[in-house]
Image (cartoon, grey):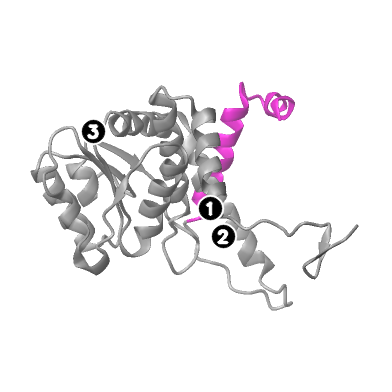
Amino acid sequence: MMRLARWLDLDRYEDMRSVYAKALRTSAESPLPERRQDGDGGYSTVGVVAGTLAAEIARLGECANAMQLIAAASVLAESRNLFSLGLRAEHPVAHHFAYTLSRLGRQAVVLDAAGGLGIDALRGVGKGDVVLAAGIEPYCRATIETARQAAHQGVAVVAITDSSVSPLARMAKASVIVISNSQSCFKSIAPALVASEILAKLIAAKSGMNVDEVVKEVERQLAELHVFWKPPDSRKRGGLAVS
C-alpha cells in the first residue's frame, strides 16, 4: 500500500486513505441506486452501503477526528463515576460502550431508563463525574433532557453526535463528530458504535492499569460463571465417553 501511495505521488498511506474516504463521502450524497434491472440480487446495494460505512468509519482515524477521540477519552478516563447514555437508536452505542469497558476492568452505569428509573442513577452525582451521551439526528428528547440534567448537576458531558451544533455538542465538554449516512432510509449507528469502542480502548490505556492482566482476570471470572458457550468435548458422543 505504501508503494501504491508513492506511485500516486502521495507521501503517506494515510493521504491515500483520506482521498479514498473523501471520494466515498462525496458519492454518499447521491441517492441510493435502484436495484438493477438485470437482477443483480441486490449486490450493488450491498457494495454501496458497505463502502459508505467503511469510509465513515475510516474517517475516525483522520488526524482531526483522532484528536477528538483522544480529548474525549481524557475527560472520560479522569471521571470519578462514569455513565453511558443513549436511547432509542443510540441505545446499542451506550450499552456496548459500558459492556466493552466492563471487559477492560472499568465500570460505566447505563442510563437506559428501564422501568422509567434510568435517571435515578444521577442522584448525588456532580463535579468529577462524566456521562458519555450518544445522539444522532433525529435527536431523542429524553437523551437531551437527561444529559442537560446531568450537566446542571455539574457532570461533564462527552458527546458522540453527528454535528458540532447538535444539542449534545452544545452542552458537551468534548465531542466526537461522526457521519451517519448509511445510503439507506435510516441513519447508521455503525460509526458511533466504533467510536465508542475506540474510546473504551483509550480509557483503558490512560488508566495506567495492566490491561492484559485485567482482561485475563475478567475472562477467568466469566469462565467460572459459564457465561459463554463452549463446544462439547470431542471425546464424548451422545453423553458417553469415547475411548
* Amino acid type at image mark 1: Leu
Label 2, label 1: how far apart the Cα atoms are: 6 Å
Sequence-wise, which precedes: disc 3 or disc 1?
A: 1
* Amino acid type at image mark 2: Val
Q: Which mark is residue 35?
A: none
- Against 196, residue 180 (above or below) is below
Q: Which of 194 and 17 is in front in this view?
A: 194
Q: Residue at x 24, y 50 (%)?
A: 166
Q: Which of 131 and 115 is in front in this view?
A: 115
Q: Which mark is residue 49?
A: 2
- Against 204, residue 175 (above or below) is below
| Res 195 visible | no
Q: Disc 1 on helix, strand or loop?
A: helix
Q: Disc 3 on helix, strand or loop?
A: loop
Q: Which residue is drawn at 57% across and 68% down?
A: 33
Q: Give the range drawn in magenta.
A: 1-28
In x, y percent, where is residue 116?
20, 67
Q: Residue under label 1, please give it.
A: 53
